[in-house]
């Protein structure tokens, strides 16, 4: 009888752990909303206002949102142009020894602390861009490159897995029909791995938009953001506005509420991207 | 035709080498700029302003923060994983628990940092402190701990459980004595990866734990604490002198080295685990 009781207690304790793990998300949502709603309540002028100037009590985040997407999408395109061919190579052509060197390197690249990467960008990329292309140096282009380095490993790993998941029979059938290896990859393997590759890109985009420190250090962060017209202009993104602003915002002021509201917007964007990823993967599996 | 195939192959190969090159360029650059400043006094002294002293409090602070983070996230994460794999009935509660833990993994770290700031620092009154920082880092790596532990527990063959139950062990005895014993290398690998993530995280620590330039060791868990990433951030963005940049490189090198040691250990553990388990 005693033994049964112990079992029962342990099961309940484990259950409570699982429930409390998931409750953290609830807490996050409730507290973020509680702090952010006064600014969200501004409505149109918050979401589509063109002026972000806390000292003048203007909190329009539209230019920041646009910059965030410009930075995120650009970095993703670079990561896709390098990452997808690299994934094809790793999955289809690489000899074992090359794979055993490249794969761990790619995995380590994920973990380089973002602050170190940002510092590297600040010391190397920015002078390089300033000297060769002009401008301030701190610009969208620098953000693209640094974020592409951070997104690349995710794109490579997930794309490689989804290319490997294409049944071998498909490839054999195509080769038996007289197609060359490259034709097979282009016409058979890649179309079948499409959903996985797409998922890796959307997930990478979510990571890029949520990334803070590395981007913050290379994009310039002008005090009054505007919609950029060239890739050599400095911009502010959602994450960098929060980190820089939170030091100056008086607790309880509209500025502080607006920063939390930006956090909610960021959360919403990333959540939507993640939801799309899940749908894409699920569709790919059911197909 | 053959020539074209080879050209494309070389092109594909060179893209994968670019990823490797990115890693090597960053690590080599940090190494060559940071190695010169590293000596015993840099590692064992306290910093003074931006340009003088060492990074001892920063190293200790980072280790303490990661320690608190693991003390929070590991027991909770492993317990949740055990529940989800071994006990959870297939119902709406389980599904929503899974869904929310997945959600937590998708929340950007800066948002978790904001939550730590409003909930732990202000609402619970813990202040900008080691405890706030460590717990917030714990919120961040919790979903990774759950996921890694789940994967590790799932790879243990079900026959182990059956054998243990058939010998008269209770369910919990089987889980504790058999399942966890076989799954622990996988769980530890997951924890190590989470640890690397927590150690390099800047935004969360910046908002909840301290300014990074503290030159003292924390006396209690309610004191603000310095940490390597925030120290690098401060020096890189507010130092503006050669001396502070070279200090930031030294600190980056220490941070990368700590991270590489952790992830190599994790890879080693995983490889040993895979070869051992594939022996059946």
Image (spheres, coloured by chain):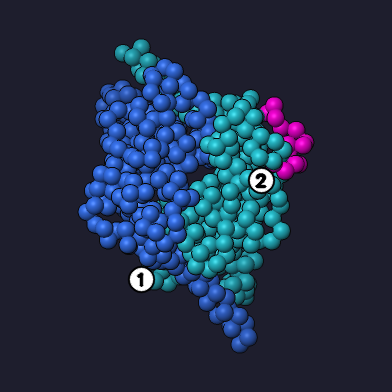
Chain colours: A blue, B cyan
Residue pushed farthest right? B40
Residue pushed farthest bottom? A1
Mark 2 to mark 1 CA distance (whole Å): 45 Å
Q: Residue at x 72, y 38 (%)?
A: B53
Q: Residue at x 50, y 35 (%)?
A: A118
Q: Return the residue nearer the eye: A182 or A32.
A: A32
Q: Tag 1 or tag 2, which sits nearer the N-term? A: 2
Question: In this image, B274 relative to A93: left or right?
Answer: right
Q: Secondary structure at mark 2?
A: helix
Q: Residue at x 51, y 73 (%)?
A: A16
Residue picked out by circle 2: B58
Residue B187 appears in the figure: no
Tell me the magenta residue range: B35-47
Is B41 colored magenta in this rendering?
yes
Residue B243 percent location from the top left of the image: 64, 29
Q: What chain does badge 1 belong to?
A: B
Question: In this image, B129 relative to A96: left or right?
Answer: right
Residue A58 appears in the figure: yes
Q: Which mark is residue B92?
A: 1
Q: Return the residue nearer the eye: B28 or A101.
A: B28
Q: Kindly indicate whether the residues beneath marks 2 and 1 are on one polypeptide chain.
A: yes
- In the image, is residue A195 above or below residue B31? below
Residue A100 percent location from the top left of the image: 54, 32
């Amino acid at each position: 009888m005693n033994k049964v009781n112990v079992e029962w207690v342990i099961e309940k304790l484990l259950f409570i752990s699982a429930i409390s793990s998931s409750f953290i998300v609830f807490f996050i949502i409730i507290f973020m909303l509680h702090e952010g709603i006064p600014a969200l309540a501004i409505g149109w002028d918050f979401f589509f206002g063109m002026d972000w100037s806390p000292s003048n009590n203007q909190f329009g985040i539209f230019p920041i949102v646009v910059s965030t997407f410009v930075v995120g999408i650009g970095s993703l395109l670079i990561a896709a142009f390098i990452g997808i061919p690299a994934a094809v190579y790793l999955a289809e052509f690489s000899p074992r020894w090359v794979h055993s060197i490249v794969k761990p390197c790619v995995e380590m690249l994920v973990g380089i602390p973002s602050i170190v990467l940002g510092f590297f960008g600040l010391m190397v990329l920015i002078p390089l861009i300033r000297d060769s292309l002009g401008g301030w140096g701190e610009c969208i282009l620098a953000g693209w490159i640094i974020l592409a380095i951070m997104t690349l490993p995710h794109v490579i790993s997930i794309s490689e897995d989804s290319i490997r998941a294409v049944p071998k029979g498909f490839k054999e059938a195509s080769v038996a029909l007289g197609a060359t290896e490259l034709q097979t990859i282009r016409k058979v393997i890649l179309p079948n791995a499409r959903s996985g590759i797409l998922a890796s890109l959307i997930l990478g985009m979510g990571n890029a938009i949520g990334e803070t420190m590395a981007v913050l250090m290379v994009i310039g962060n002008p005090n009054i953001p505007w919609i950029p017209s060239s890739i050599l202009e400095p911009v502010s993104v959602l994450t960098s506005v929060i980190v820089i602003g939170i030091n100056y915002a008086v607790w309880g002021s509209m500025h502080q509420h607006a920063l939390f509201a930006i956090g909610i917007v960021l959360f919403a964007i990333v959540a939507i991207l993640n939801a799309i990823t899940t749908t894409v993967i699920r569709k790919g599996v059911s197909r | 035709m053959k020539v074209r195939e080879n050209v494309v192959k070389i092109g594909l190969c060179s893209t994968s080498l670019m990823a490797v090159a990115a890693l090597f360029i960053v690590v080599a650059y940090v190494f060559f700029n940071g190695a010169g400043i590293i000596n015993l006094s840099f590692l064992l002294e306290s910093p003074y302003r931006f340009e003088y002293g060492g990074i001892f409090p920063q190293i200790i602070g980072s280790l303490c923060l990661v320690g608190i983070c693991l003390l929070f996230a590991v027991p909770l994460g492993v317990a949740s994983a055990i529940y989800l794999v071994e006990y959870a009935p297939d119902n709406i509660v389980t599904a929503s628990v899974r869904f929310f833990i997945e959600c937590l993994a998708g929340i950007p770290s800066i948002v978790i940092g904001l939550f730590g700031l409003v909930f732990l620092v202000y609402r619970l009154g813990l202040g900008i402190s080691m405890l706030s920082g460590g717990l917030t880092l714990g919120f961040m790596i919790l979903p990774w701990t759950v996921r890694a532990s789940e994967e590790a527990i799932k790879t243990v063959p079900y026959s182990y459980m059956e054998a243990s139950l058939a010998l008269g062990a209770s369910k919990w005895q089987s889980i504790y004595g058999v399942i966890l014993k076989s799954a622990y290398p996988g769980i530890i690998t997951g924890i190590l990866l989470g640890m690397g993530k927590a150690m390099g995280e800047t935004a969360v620590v910046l908002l909840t734990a301290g300014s990074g330039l503290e030159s003292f060791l924390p006396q209690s868990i309610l004191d603000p604490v310095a940490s390597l990433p925030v120290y690098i951030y401060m020096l890189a963005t507010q130092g503006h002198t050669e001396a502070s940049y070279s200090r930031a490189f030294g600190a980056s090198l220490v941070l990368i080295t700590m991270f590489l040691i952790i992830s190599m250990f994790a890879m080693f553990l995983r490889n040993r685990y895979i070869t051992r388990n594939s022996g059946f």
